[in-house]
Amino acid sequence: MPDAARYNVTLSARDLAVARGGRVIVDGVNLSVGPGEAVIFRGPNGAGKTTLLRALAGLLKPVAGEVTVSDEDQTVFCGVLNGGKPTLTVNENLRFWAALYSARVGEARAAFGLEPVERRPMRELSTGYQRRLGLARLVLSGRAIWIVDEPTAGLDTASTTAFERLLAEHRARGGAAILATHEPLEAPNARTLELRP
Amino acid sequence: MSGFLAVIARDVRLAFRAGGGALQAAAFFALTIVLFALAVGPDLTLMSEIAAPVLWTAALLATLISLEQIYRPDREDGSLDVLAETNGLLALTALAKAIAHWISTGLLLTAATPVLALLLNIEGDALWPLLLSLLIGAPGLSLIGSFAAALTAALPRAGLLIAIIVSPLYAPILIFGAGAASAGAAGDPQYSANLALLGASSLFAAIFSPLASAAALRFNLD
């Protein structure tokens, strides 16, 4: 997706209920996230943040309600796991994702300062660098709606700032984001949704 | 389409990297045959009679031990989520992964067969039917096996469970594969019938396995 392009995609959830291990943990979620918007889920461990995110990303079938996205293939999910292969190098992982998302590696490598480690296998990277590689997939995918679980877990201050800046740029281009986090995150005008166990 | 090919290329590359399992499967295959040749001893007539069934059984077991690597690592490192949200139909991704498994296991075993055939006293004329049966049957082993791997992707140490699931499903391929190789070596007219049935088994697996794998993976994503 060229820089000039603007996204125009809205994700909405209606009366959503999700279960983990057969037990309903979150229900009655109504949500609409459109161009430029961001929603942050907060709540204690076990409140169902991750499960809800997976349902919004279409990876988990909700027990009730529905999730609709105004355009096909416009969500990208980054969970706590980074989704890279430990034995592939940073570059190999990025190129594989680029083929999957029909995108180009482009600025994604530089966005999180991955150049110094680009030829090293992912398993040799520190936790922080592995997370940066995982987050680089959001930028690379060129998709409108980022769905991210604990985006800044394991990141240093500089990388957290880099993520906040990229998120702001993404929203400025009409992108949207749904995040779950325990940590303070600079995201102007983001709505907060408190989940309780 | 580029995503389909990228999945094949990635999985083949991973299979030959450390811990990938392709070379272990090939080594296991060779080891089984060498041990068997040692156990039978110097009776060359007996050896060439049972060579094809032995080689087919060894190929099946070597395939079996590599199946767990198809989906479980992808689920553990989160890349199954990435595969599920890209590439359109999950069934096509499942097909790509089965093809990659065949290239890194079945094709490798077929390529190693001419060397190991020497140990089992398989003569020149008997070698071609054996290779042909492996070329037609091994893709079926990978396809059926990848379905069992998808079914058990969320279970740790599922190796034995996979073996129990696939063994009955592998029976037709083993029977027709070893049957074709033996019949071909003996100049038996049942050779072509066995090959046709072997091909039918593989084709059936090619249709059923990607669809069933996709359904099993959806279930294992949560």
Image (cartoon, grey):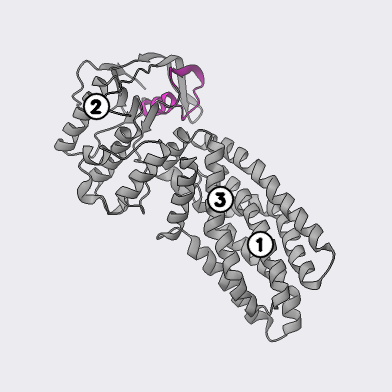
Amino acid type of the residue that numbered disc 2 sits on in the rendered structure: Leu
Q: Return the chain for callout 2.
A: A
Circle 1: is it few (<14), some (14-19), or many (20+) Cα within 10 Å? many
- C-alpha separation, residue under disc 2 versus residue under disc 1: 53 Å
- Disc on the earlier residue, 1 or 3: 3
- Residue type highlighted by circle 1: Leu
Residue A47 appearing in the image = yes
Q: Which residues are magenta?
A: A48-71
Q: Which residue is mark 3?
A: B99
**Helix, strand or loop for disc 1:** helix
Instruction: Examine the rendered structure and indicate whether residue B25 appears above or below residue B158.
Output: below
Confirm whether circles 1 and 3 share one chain. yes
Residue that badge 1 annotates: B134
> Under tag 3, what secondary structure?
helix
Q: CA distance from mark 2 to mark 3?
A: 38 Å
Badge 2 density bin: few <14, some 14–19, many ≥20, Cα 10 Å:
many
Q: Is residue A52 magenta?
A: yes
Q: Residue at x 72, y 84 (%)?
A: B44
Q: Chain of mark 1?
A: B
Q: Is there one chain holding both mark 2 and mark 3?
A: no
Residue at 30 percent of width and 48 percent of height: A90
* Amino acid at pointer 3: Ile
* Identity of the residue drawn at 41% across and 59% down: B17
Q: Would residue B152 be seen by someone viewing this image from the given angle?
A: no
The residue tagged with tag 2: helix, strand or loop?
helix
Q: Residue furthest left?
A: A158
In front here: A84 or A193? A84
Expressed as whole percent of the image width and height from the top left, the position of residue A157 reads: 15, 36
Give residue A176's position: percent from left, percent from top.
31, 21
* Residue A167: numbered disc: 2
Task: List x then y, in percent, for residue A14.
Answer: 45, 13
